[in-house]
Image (cartoon, rainbow, N blue to C red):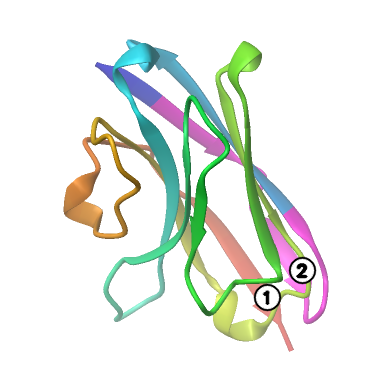
Amino acid sequence: QVQLVESGGGLVQDGGSLRLSCAASGRTFSSASMGWFRQAPGKEREFVAAIRWSGASTRYADSVKGRFTISRDNAKNTLYLQMNSLKPEDTAVYYCAASKLSYIGTYYGNYNYWGQGTQVTVSS
């Protein structure tokens, strides 16, 4: 099992920045990649970004490319999401997830473990 705990969400103005963190514990070596998803009220959970746990490969949703940066600190078993130039449409609950797949998946079904989520609200 892998336990994931997100932090860093909050309220920010349009154009502002936030950094989300996800602390992983348990059998983290079983997770080949980590990712961030988000879900706004009334909408489906959508892929945001992902990174291979053992390498530098990353992948982003088109809507966040150039604004968000995913990174990880293997020594701390922590995943990050730096979010810049935030927009009101980025408002959602953000979830950290871990996958056993050898490739970076963008479908929520590709991920085996999930955190409880952290709320990000961007005001206009």
Please identify the quadrant where the N terminus is shown: top left
Residue 59 is left or right of residue 47, and the answer is right
Q: Secondary structure at mark 2?
A: strand
Image quadrant where residue 113 sits: top left
Q: Report crowding for label 1: few under 14, some 14 to 19, many 20 or more residues within 10 A (C-alpha).
A: some
Which residue is located at x 41 percent, y 74 percent? 40
Q: Report crowding for label 2: few under 14, some 14 to 19, many 20 or more residues within 10 A (C-alpha).
A: some
Q: Are marks 2 and 1 in contact (CB under 8 Å)?
A: yes
Tell whether position 48 is magenta: no
Image quadrant where residue 83 sits: bottom right
Tell whether position 16 is magenta: yes
Our reading of the magenta stretch's main secondary structure is strand
Q: Mark 1 is on which residue type?
A: Val
What residue span does the magenta drawing correspond to? 4-18
Residue 118 is left or right of residue 69, and the answer is left
Mark 2 → mark 1, Cα distance in angstroms: 5 Å
Which residue is located at x 67 percent, y 55 percent? 69
Residue 123: x %, y % from top left = 71, 81
Number of callouts? 2
Q: Nearer the viewer, residue 117 or 31?
A: 31
Which residue is located at x 21 percent, y 36 percent? 112
Q: Nearer the viewer, residue 60 or 114?
A: 60
Which residue is located at x 80 percent, y 63 percent? 17
Q: Mark 2 is on which residue type?
A: Val
Residue 29 is left or right of residue 88, and the answer is left
Provide the residue designation for mark 1.
122
Provide the residue designation for mark 2.
12
Would you place residue 83 above or below residue 14 in this image?
Answer: above
